[in-house]
């Protein structure tokens, strides 16, 4: 099934039932067909259609859009030219295209009319509105996509080729189905089929500025390796491990409920010998760091007790066996513990006894016992203002409590249908509750509920995949991005949550090579804003702890991205005490700016002036002839020679290296470069050699010695003089031009080994010519002398 775009010359070919769509560029000269992309699709193709040119997002350099029909979905596949979008209209990519007004009626054509459809511009700034006058019996195309697409249109996410500047192995929605990266790399067109679009309407929804969020594991120097004896059987309500800005707590599988503490400032390979630990004497159910005291660790055990530990400054130097405080009140095993977000020393805990209890760590007393649950409590979360507590329960209910006013829930609503586990988190400034759980088919699904009306049920849902582990959410209130993963997963899901339809905006996911046992996040101040890092996490695997940075790809990183970094709340500092909160007081975190003093906000940055003029796509796709390559090479060499008197090169300021040493090292670089370039470079040399041989034969008797020298270097005398820009051949001028051109074409300063090799061969050719001229100028030896020294 071929689809052809006459404006760009792009041809897509797909077959019924195939899972691949190939794209070619058609030209009137050889090679006629040049493959642009080889794109694998998620499902077999049942049909394809091309979207009209006037419906494309031209400001993002979209040159073609194909719709793939599968058994269940209509999937858009976008083809983009990788240029800076949103800056200006690239006229070289978009010639005038056929309009939507008929040139004549059927009767006019039958009588011999040959009028053509009038062409219109696709430039949004000067695109004229379609003529209201329509031919008779012509109905408006109501279902045609609008001609003026908004800049906020959601670009297709998910499956993208590795040649894309925003793609990575960690952002592929399905690594086993990723498109081929071996075809069409030189064409400049990037196909991007969506694997997450459930219907064509998703293409018309709002777009997330974090849709290309990339996760990257940091350098190995920041890892904790050689981790042994990790406890892999923590309860489903436990996050697996926990961290603050200074240290990490990891449960071990040894007897006595031991927890290892690692200082983040002491990353590296762990010792094989025993490490000092915290011994709880019972199995660990859940544990959490105090957000306002980085030395306080709270551990819930199987014996229905909560132990409060104090880690000394600098980390553990000996095993701790005696906790600072023991909290008792629950009658059965504890599920989870959560600190209050504003009040210091206020803790909530849930238990098998179906109660949620509040504790004042300052006095060590139980202050509240919330009731109303009929089954196991899967998860709980404090609201951002600290006034309410939400819980999700195995009895299928979602509840909201106001603990200071009542021990009974103030609201109840239907929760997830599945009973395998769930988590809850407050989002969008506390206006909504997001629940990660399971549906009736055991598929992991995200649900969004209005905090003001739980009884109305979920207002939106987003299914993810099928897996036995519960997705554990981390929500960033500054960006409204939620990052989710499960214990034992290799994929990290990322969504932006917005307070309007479609509510869930899926972003690029992060994939790891091996399953992780947990993912914990650090305060926002640990992010490197110069790299547009919006979240910093720690990934726990079976034998290591690895920092992972989540970054937004931006072009002008020298400016502070103030649209990504609003003032952040200082949630690691308390605003009131537990006693004050229990007495009815409310607090609020103060905010700080993450902008470094030496950076200017991007909103105040001068407008970038685009000076580069782009050539048509055909310029990059067509095969150049040998003559064109030679002309470009000579032009480049002469242009660089013209800059001879400019600023000195960086190498010229180096001290302590003799000239002959530089020559030796540069000669080694030339040899290595020739080996690296490989067969393509050898093919170019053979072409140059054949051309020089033909030229030497055509010149006839221009000197047998000169022709012999040309055959040795594969270059004629005239070519060598043009490359080194020499009108008259003198040893001094030859050495001067050679040294300059060799330096400006050094790889370290933006040059290439290929151009350096041309300079070297030209130097060799001219050296040969100088040697020949020197021999000719010397007097010939007498015949008897020549007979005496036949070896000469």
Image (cartoon, rainbow, N blue to C red):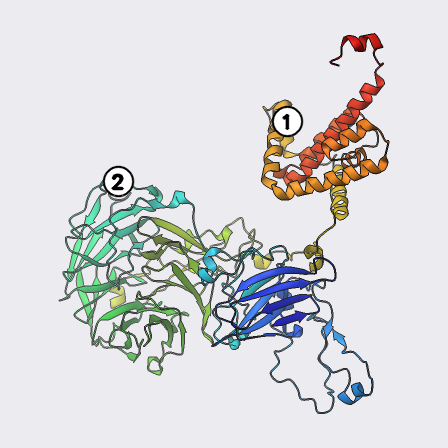
Q: Nearer the viewer, residue 349 or 713?
A: 713
Q: Nearer the viewer, residue 569 or 735?
A: 735
- The part of the image, by quadrant, that contains residue 175 is bottom left
Residue at figure coordinates x 74%, y 59% from the top left: 29
- The part of the image, by quadrant, that contains residue 665 is top right
User: SS class of the residue under badge 2?
Assistant: loop
What number is the disc on residue 1? none
Residue at figure coordinates x 51%, y 49% from the top left: 597
> What residue is disc 1 on?
663
Q: Position of residue 185 (x, y in %)?
A: 60, 55
Q: Position of residue 42 (x, y in %)?
A: 48, 68
Left or right: where 124 falls relative to 298: right
Task: Using the image, determine if residue 760 lies above or below residue 86.
Answer: above
- Mark 2 or 1, nearer chain start: 2
Is residue 640 among what the camera can see? no
Q: Position of residue 516 (x, y in %)?
A: 34, 56
Residue at figure coordinates x 68%, y 71% from the top left: 124
Left or right: where 562 falls relative to 454: right
User: SS class of the residue under badge 1?
Assistant: helix
Query: Which quadrant does the C terminus fall into?
Result: top right
> What residue is disc 2 on?
272
Left or right: where 122 falls relative to 577: right
Q: Nearer the viewer, residue 136 or 701?
A: 701
């Amino acid at each position: 099934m071929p689809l052809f775009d006459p404006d760009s010359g792009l041809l897509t070919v797909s077959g019924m039932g195939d899972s691949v769509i190939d794209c070619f560029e058609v030209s009137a000269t050889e090679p006629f067909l040049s493959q642009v992309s080889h794109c694998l699709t998620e499902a077999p193709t049942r049909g394809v259609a091309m979207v009209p040119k006037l419906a494309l997002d031209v400001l993002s350099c979209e040159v073609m859009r194909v719709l793939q029909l599968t058994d269940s979905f209509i999937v858009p596949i976008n083809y983009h030219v990788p240029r800076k979008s949103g800056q200006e209209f690239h006229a070289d990519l978009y010639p005038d295209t056929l309009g939507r007004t008929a040139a004549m009626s059927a009767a006019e054509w039958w009588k011999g009319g040959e009028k053509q459809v009038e062409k219109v511009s696709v430039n949004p700034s000067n695109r004229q509105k379609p003529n209201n006058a329509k031919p008779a019996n012509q109905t408006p195309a109501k279902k045609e996509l609008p001609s003026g697409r908004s800049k906020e249109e959601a670009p297709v996410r998910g499956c993208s080729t590795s040649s894309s500047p925003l793609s990575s192995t960690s952002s592929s929605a399905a690594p086993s189905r990723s498109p081929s990266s071996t075809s069409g790399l030189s064409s400049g067109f990037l196909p991007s089929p969506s694997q997450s679009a459930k219907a064509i309407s998703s293409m018309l929804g709002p777009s997330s500025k974090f849709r290309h969020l990339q996760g990257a594991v940091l350098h190995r120097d920041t890892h904790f390796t050689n981790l042994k004896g990790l406890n892999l059987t923590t309860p489903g309500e436990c996050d697996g491990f926990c961290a603050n800005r200074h240290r990490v707590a990891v449960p071990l599988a040894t007897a006595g409920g031991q927890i290892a503490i690692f200082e983040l400032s002491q990353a590296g390979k762990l010792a094989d010998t025993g490490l000092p630990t915290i011994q709880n004497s019972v199995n660990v159910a859940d544990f959490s760091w105090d957000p306002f005291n980085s030395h306080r660790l709270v551990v819930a055990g199987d014996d229905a007790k909560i132990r409060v530990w104090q880690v000394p400054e600098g980390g553990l130097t000996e095993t701790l066996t005696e906790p600072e405080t023991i909290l008792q009140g629950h009658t059965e095993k504890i599920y989870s513990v959560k600190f209050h977000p504003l009040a210091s020393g206020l803790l909530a805990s849930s238990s098998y006894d179906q109660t949620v209890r509040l504790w004042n760590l300052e006095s060590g007393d139980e202050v509240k016992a919330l009731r109303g649950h009929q089954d196991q409590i899967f998860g709980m979360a404090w609201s951002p203002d600290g006034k309410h507590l939400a819980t999700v329960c195995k009895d299928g209910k979602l509840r909201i409590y106001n603990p200071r006013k009542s021990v009974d829930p103030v609201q109840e609503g239907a929760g997830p249908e599945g009973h395998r586990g769930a988590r809850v988190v407050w989002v969008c400034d506390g206006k909504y509750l997001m629940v990660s759980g399971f549906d009736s088919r055991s598929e992991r699904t995200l649900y969004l509920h209005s905090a003001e009306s739980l009884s109305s049920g979920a207002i939106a849902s987003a299914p993810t995949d099928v897996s036995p582990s519960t997705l554990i959410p981390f929500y960033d209130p500054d960006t409204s991005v939620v990052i989710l993963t499960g214990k034992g997963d290799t994929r990290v899901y990322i969504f932006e949550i917005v307070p309007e339809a479609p509510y869930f905006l899926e972003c690029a996911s992060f994939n790891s090579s091996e399953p992780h046992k947990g993912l914990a996040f650090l305060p926002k101040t640990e992010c490197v804003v110069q790299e547009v890092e919006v979240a910093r996490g720690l990934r726990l695997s079976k034998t290591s702890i690895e920092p992972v940075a989540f970054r937004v790809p931006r072009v002008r990183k020298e400016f502070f991205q103030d649209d990504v970094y609003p003032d952040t709340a200082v949630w690691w500092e308390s605003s009131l005490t537990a006693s004050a909160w229990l007495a009815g007081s409310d607090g609020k975190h103060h905010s700080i700016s993450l902008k470094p003093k030496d950076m200017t906000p991007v909103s105040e940055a001068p407008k970038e002036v685009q000076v580069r003029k782009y050539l048509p796509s055909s310029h990059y796709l067509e095969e150049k002839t040998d003559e064109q390559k030679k002309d470009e090479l000579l032009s480049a060499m002469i242009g660089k020679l013209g800059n001879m008197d400019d600023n000195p090169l960086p190498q010229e300021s180096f001290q302590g290296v003799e000239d002959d040493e530089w020559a030796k090292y540069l000669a080694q670089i030339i040899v290595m470069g020739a080996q690296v370039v490989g067969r393509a470079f050898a093919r170019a040399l053979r072409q140059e050699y054949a051309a020089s041989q033909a030229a030497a034969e055509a010149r006839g008797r221009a000197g047998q010695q000169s022709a012999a020298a040309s055959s040795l270097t594969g270059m004629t005398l005239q070519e060598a003089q043009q490359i080194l820009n020499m009108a008259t051949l003198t040893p001094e001028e030859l050495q001067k031009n050679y040294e300059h051109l060799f330096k400006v074409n050094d790889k370290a300063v933006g040059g290439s080994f290929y151009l350096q090799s041309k300079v070297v061969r030209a130097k060799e050719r001219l050296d040969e010519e100088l040697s020949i001229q020197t021999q000719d100028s010397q007097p010939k030896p007498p015949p008897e002398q020549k007979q005496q020294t036949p070896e000469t």
